[in-house]
């Protein structure tokens, strides 16, 4: 398998998509999508753009070359989860967190 096909599978699983749903979201048939994921063929530029949109890929070069494109995505998800938890705190608890982090408000 190429790094592209590995990353395509990783992205699909990260979003919890089935192959059928990923294919529908990208606008191709299931067999075509499976060929990309199993490294039997590669998408043309039209479908590559759709893949990037479907999986919200921010660094296409990393996605294609096989670098860990998920590193940034995972950090963003973790940061968002922390923000949701922080926003759910009451005023007193937010002040405590801010003091611990050295943030003055």
Image: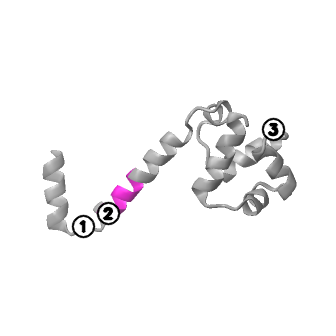
Tally of numbered tags: 3
Q: Tell me where residue 68 sits by quadrant.
A: top right
Q: CA distance from mark 1 to mark 3?
A: 46 Å
Q: x, y (%) of residue 101?
A: 18, 47
- Residue at 13% across / 51% down in the picture? 99
Using residue 8 as the reference point, say whether residue 36 is left or right of it.
Answer: right
CB atoms at circles 3 and 2 under 8 Å apart?
A: no
Q: Residues within 10 Å of mark 3 (few under 14, many from 20)?
A: few
Of the pair 12 and 26, the residue shown nearer to us: 12
Of the pair 21 and 102, the residue shown nearer to us: 21
Q: Residues within 10 Å of mark 2 (few under 14, many from 20)?
A: few
SS at circle 2: helix
Using residue 29 as the reference point, say whether residue 76 is left or right of it.
Answer: left
Q: Which residues are magenta?
A: 79-85
SS at circle 1: loop
**Sooner in the amino-acid sequence: mark 3 or mark 2:** 3
Q: Tell me where residue 1 sits by quadrant.
A: top right
């Amino acid at each position: 398998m190429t790094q592209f096909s590995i990353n395509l599978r990783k992205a699909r699983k990260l979003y919890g998509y089935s192959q059928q749903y990923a294919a529908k979201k990208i606008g191709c048939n299931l067999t075509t999508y499976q060929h990309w994921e199993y490294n039997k063929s590669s998408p043309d530029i039209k479908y590559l753009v759709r893949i990037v949109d479907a999986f919200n890929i921010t660094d296409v070069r990393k996605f294609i070359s096989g670098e860990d494109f998920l590193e940034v995505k995972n950090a963003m998800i973790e940061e968002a989860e922390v923000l949701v938890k922080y926003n759910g705190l009451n005023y007193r608890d937010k002040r405590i967190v801010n003091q611990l982090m050295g943030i003055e408000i």
